Image: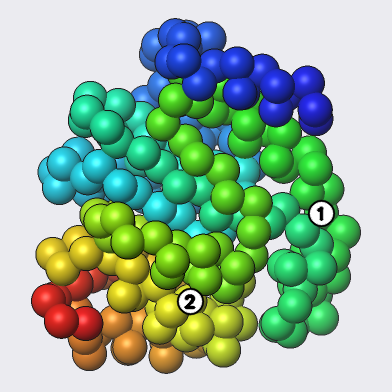
Amino acid sequence: MRELEQDLAALQAGQGALWPADEMTPERVVERLEGWCTPRKAAWLARLVAETGARKIGEIGVYGGRSLVPMALAARGVEGAELWAVEPWSNAAATACETSAENDSWWQNVDMAKIKAGFLEAVRGCGLSAMVRVVELTADQARAAFMLDQSQGFDVLHIDGAHAEARALADVRGWLPLVRPGGVIVLDDIGWESVFKARDFLRARCEVIEEVREEGEALVTYGAYRVAGGV
C-alpha cells in the first residue's frame, strides 16, 4: 500500500496514463473497478461534468472509484480541474449507522485496504494523479474541513455515502452549502426508501435536472439537482 501511495505522489507532476486508451472510456473503466456504478451511470456522470465544464468536483463515498474516475476522465480537458475524493476506507465508519444485519455484516468484512489500493492504481493507471485529491476522512470530518475553506464551492458534487436514513439526510444537509449557486448535486440511490428524505430535501430546495431509474433486475436510481442562490 505504501508503495502504491508513493507511486501516486510521484505522478503528481502529471505523467501520462499507463492503461490502454481504449479502456479509459467511462463505460470501460468501470469494468476494472470495484463498486456498483453502472456503465450507463458512469457515462451519465461524465456527460454531466463535460456539459457543465466543472472545475471543482467532489464525491462523498468513493469506494473503488467507479463513479469518480469517469468524472475525472471527463474533466481532463478543463484547465485547473480537481477531483476531491472523500472516503475513509474504514469498516467502522461504513457501519457507524445501522442499516440491516446483512448489509452491516458485509461492510464489516469487506477488505477496505484492497479496495483503496485498486482505486489508487486506477488513478495512477489513467494518468489522473495531478487532478485527484484524496481526503481519507469521514463525510462529517471532511465537511468540517471544507467549511473552513473560503475558496469557490463545488461545481459538481456526487453524494454516495452510507444509505442509512439519518446518514443520507445529514450528508445532503451538510454538503449542500458547499456547492456553489448554479452548481449540481448528484444523489445516488434515490429509489431506496432510506434515501427518500434526502432526495425530498433536495427536491424542495433545488431545481430537479433529471432523475434516472435504470431498467433491470437491480434497483439503480440517481438524480441531479441544480443549487439555487442563497441556499
Residue identifier under label 2: 171
Query: Residue at point 60% right, 68% down?
Result: 141
Crowdedness of circle 2 by 10 Å Cα count: few (<14), some, many (20+)? many
Residue 104 percent location from the top left of the image: 79, 73
Q: Secondary structure at mark 1?
A: loop
Q: Please name the amino acid that badge 2 sits on.
A: Asp
User: Is residue 64 at all visible to an observer of this figure?
Assistant: yes
| Contact check, label 2 and label 1, Cβ < 8 Å | no
Q: Secondary structure at mark 2?
A: helix
Residue identifier under label 1: 110
Crowdedness of circle 1 by 10 Å Cα count: few (<14), some, many (20+)? few
Task: Give the distance between the C-alpha atoms of the residues marked 2 and 1, in whole angstroms.
Answer: 23 Å
Q: Is residue 65 left or right of residue 118?
A: left
Q: Earlier in the sequence, mark 2 or mark 1?
A: 1
Q: Quadrant of residue 113?
A: top right
Q: Please name the amino acid that badge 1 sits on.
A: Val
The image shows residue 35, relative to residue 137, as above or below, that is above
Query: Residue at point 83% right, 48% down?
Result: 111
**Foreground disc of the pair 2, 1:** 2
The image shows residue 14, relative to residue 219, as above or below, that is above
Q: Is residue 52 left or right of residue 212?
A: left
Residue 93 percent location from the top left of the image: 74, 68
